[in-house]
Amino acid sequence: MTKILMSSEEDNKEKQNSIMVPIDEMDTVSSDSPNTVDELAMELATIKQSAKKIAIIGSRNLPITHQQMIETLAQALVMQGNTIITSGGSSGTNAAAIRGAMKANPDKLKVILPQTIGQQPSDVQNQLIGVPNIVEHPDRAMMTLADASRVCNREIIDDCNQLICFLSHTSKTLHNAVQYAEEGHKVITVFYLD
C-alpha cells in the first residue's frame, strides 16, 4: 500500500478548492424509500424519447379557447411522431385531442372508450368515424359511466409514457387519475383550469 503525504501548502490549496456540503438527517435515505435515482433516470429517458405515447385526458367543461389550444397541442405532438391516447367525448379535452390528432395523422391516435361505441351519445359516435384505432369494452356495459370512466382513465395511463391532464381543482376523478400516474412513475403535466 502506498501513502501519499501532502505538504501543508498542498493541503491548504486542496481545502481551498473543495466545497463543503452539510449533511444532516434530511440527506439520509431510509431503506424503505423508493430508489429516486432510478425513477429520475426512467423519467429522463422517457422525456428524451423521440416518439412517445402521450395520454391527454381532462375536463369536458372547457371554453372554446381551451379546446382550441388542446387541439393544437395534440396536432403538434402527433406531427412530432408521438401517439395520442385519449377517450371519447363530444366536447372538452378528449374531443379536442381527437380533432387535433386526426388532423395530423389518424394512425397516431388511439381512443379507449369506457364502454362500447353503441353506448356513446350520437355526437361522440359521429366524431369517432374514421378513427382507425378504437378500443371498446363491452365487459363494462353494465357499469355506470362514472365507474367505467375511472377504469378507462387507468387503462389510458397504463398505456402511456406521459400524461397531460386538463382539470379543475375540484375534479376528484381526474385528481385520482393524476395520482395513479404518479404511482406509475409517468411523466405528468397538469393544467389547472380554475
Image: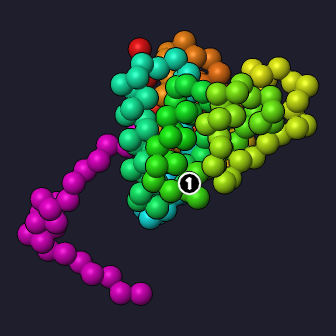
Q: Residue at 54% x, 12% y: name it.
A: 170
Residue reaching furthest bottom? 1
State whether residue 155 appears in this view. Answer: yes
Q: Which residue is mark 1?
A: 106
For the N terminus, which image quadrant? bottom left
Task: Residue 129 in the image: state x and y as whole percent.
Answer: 65, 43
In this picture the colour scheme is rainbow
Left or right: 86 as drawn, with respect to 4: right
Q: Is residue 153 magenta?
A: no
| Category of crowding for the residue at label 1, using alpha-carbon neighbours closer than 10 angstroms: few (below 14), some (14–19), many (at least 20) | some
In this view, the residue in front, 126 or 77, is 126
Q: Is residue 12 magenta?
A: yes
Task: Residue 41 in the image: state x and y as whole percent.
Answer: 49, 58
Residue reaching furthest left? 9
Task: Residue 122 in the image: state x and y as whole percent.
Answer: 70, 27
Q: Residue at 63% x, 49% y: name it.
A: 130
Q: Residue at 52% x, 30% y: name it.
A: 93
Kindly state the secondary structure of the residue where label 1 is placed. Answer: helix
State whether residue 45 appears in this view. Answer: no
Left or right: 49 as drawn, with respect to 15: right
Query: Dividing the picture into quarters, in which one does residue 56 lie?
Result: top right
In this view, the residue in front, 134 or 3, is 134
Q: Residue at 45% x, 53% y: name it.
A: 104
For the C terminus, which image quadrant? top left
Magenta residues span: 1-24
In this view, the residue in front, 62 or 45, is 62
Q: Amino acid at mark 1?
A: Pro
Task: Residue 73 in the image: state x and y as whole percent.
Answer: 40, 42
